[in-house]
Amino acid sequence: MKISRDSAISLMVFFVLLIACTAVGYWLIFRLGRATPIMLAVGVATILTCLIRKRNLATLGWGWGSWKYQWMSYLLPLVIVFVAYLVIWVAGFGGWYDSEFVAQQMQNYNLSGWSDASVIVFHLMLTATYSFVLLLPSVLGEELGWRGFLVPELAKFMSFTNVALTSGLIWAVWHWPLIFMGLYGNEGTPLYYQLFFFTLFITADAVIMTYLRFKTDSIWTAVIFHMSGNVFLQKGFDPLTVENERSAWYMGEFGAVPALVAFVIAIYFWKKGKTEFGDPSVWRTDVAPTARGNVKALPSP
């Protein structure tokens, strides 16, 4: 489908504001030492776009939808991370488990006398709950833009495949300056390697998140998926793994194994998305999501 004048202007306004707000976010990162400002910058750009274009904020997808898909959004990143790190441990790209990290957590949590296994379970449970909630403001800010505004807007004139890939690539490229500036990434692999696997990982996640957004018309699936992926990878399995000279090439957001596992799972959701939503997508003017998250045609006016 051809892009409408309204969508073209709205996307242009969004990207101009996104660049401006992101620049302010970078300025704050250097002063606060936290990534939160740049994540919130996406949400600020989205809200300003809606106000300028007189869009109802309700169109960002605040409905909860089916609990089935919310739980799927929470558990899928755990499956991806667990499978990836199981491969890493078995293949010898990293070891299970880092006793120094566990000892540090025992001290931090004041769990003297606990076994290492008990501390690991406690840490993972805390990561899956408390750490998860702490990420909500910053992740919600980011997802307001990517899956709240961008995905539905692109879906007005793109197929499911193009929406998923375009939104994913934009999301990945938005992170690139952080990698170029050395604020995000690792020191053990070449820059091109980090960019490739990070982009593959992010884009694969975006395919899954786009499917869930289409299925439920809810931004919360994206928020939950994003938070779950961050906490289980960055605060759960990554620090529990003993690194060796090869680890940087295979583990983390910039390594090969998580990206490839996510890619395989994304292929499954891409095929489902193509079958269920066809071309063009569910946000056409003549279709709308049902209460169960599927789509049906609306009668012509």
Image: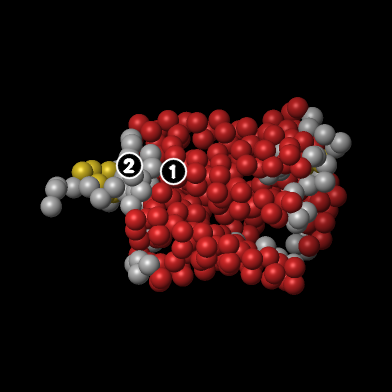
What residue is at 53 percent from the left and 45 percent from the top?
168
User: Does residue 217 appear to the left or right of 242 in the view shown?
Assistant: left
User: For the point 42% across and 30% down, which residue is it?
Assistant: 271
Helix, strand or loop status at disc 2: loop
Asked whether the viewer can see residue 63, the reply is no
The residue lying at 68 percent from left, 33 percent from top is 257
298 or 24, which lies in front?
24
Please tell me the numbered disc located at residue 163: 1
Q: Earlier in the sequence, mark 2 or mark 1?
A: 2
Residue type of the residue flagged with mark 1: Val
Q: Gap in Å between the C-alphas at discs 2 and 1? A: 12 Å
Q: How is the image coloured?
A: secondary structure
Can see residue 151?
yes
Q: Position of residue 290 (x, y in %)?
A: 26, 49
Q: Which residue is mark 2?
A: 1
- The amino acid on which the numbered mark 2 sits, given as a three-letter code, is Met
